Image (cartoon, rainbow, N blue to C red):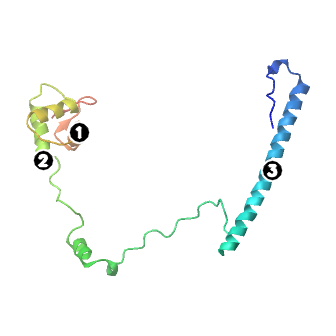
Amino acid sequence: MVRKQPSITPLSSLTIADLERLLAERKAAVAGLTERRGAIADELATINAQIYEAIGTGSVRLNRKPGPRGPGRPPKDEHDRPEKAKQAAKSSKHRGRAAGAKGQSDLHNAIRSALTGATGPMKAVDIAKAVLARGYETKSKVFHLIIGQRLAEMADVVKPERGLYALK
């Protein structure tokens, strides 16, 4: 079926009767397509029912919304845990290395020495460059961000302006 392209005319040249006729045509076309879609959906539902009947699973509702979540993780039961896990839970609440005093690591001390040698407040990027120049070794690609985190932990560092750090 070859469809003829409608001629394009400016809307200002159409009369109200022409516009109402065009609107009625469009509504009729949409109504026909909507009716056809409903018939196809009914046919698809019938075919699905036949498939599920042939499989023997009964009817399954399609396009359903997800229901509530299941019960989630079951409560902890000490009897179900392995013996090694029980011993680890009794010995310590935390895994890994014990935390040291806040603001008292080699990096903190390197930051202090870099700030001590400065003539004024410094940016985190400049502090990172000074710490690396003093021999601190790191594999970090964003070392200046780590410096910023450590500066926030240090009680003896002040921020005179935004983005600048100095020792008290």
Question: In the rendered image, which residue does mark 3 sit on?
Answer: 36
Measured in 3D between alpha carbons, the distance from the residue under mark 3 to the one under mark 2, in whole angstroms, is 74 Å
Question: Residue 9, position in %: x, y?
Answer: 81, 20
Q: Nearer the viewer, mark 3 or mark 2?
A: 3
Q: Describe the element under mark 2 as helix, strand or loop.
A: loop
Tell me: 59 left or right of 113: right
The reply to whether dot 1 and dot 2 touch (C-beta < 8 Å) is no
**Residue occupying the point 75% across, 56% down:** 41
Dot 1 or dot 2, earlier in sequence: 2
21 vs 6, nearest the viewer: 6
158 vs 16, nearest the viewer: 16
Label 1 crowd bin: few (<14), some (14–19), many (20+), radius 10 Å: few
Identity of the amino acid at label 1?
Answer: Lys
Dot 3 or dot 2, earlier in sequence: 3
Question: In the rendered image, which residue does mark 2 sit on?
Answer: 105
**Residue occupying the point 85% across, 31% down:** 22
Q: Which mark is residue 75?
A: none
Measured in 3D between alpha carbons, the distance from the residue under mark 1 to the one under mark 2, in whole angstroms, is 20 Å
Dot 3 or dot 1, earlier in sequence: 3
**Residue occupying the point 16% across, 42% down:** 138
Residue most toward the front? 1
Question: Residue 59, position in %: x, y?
Answer: 69, 70
92 over 130 or under it: above or below? below
Question: In the rendered image, which residue does mark 1 sit on?
Answer: 141
Q: Nearer the viewer, mark 1 or mark 2?
A: 1
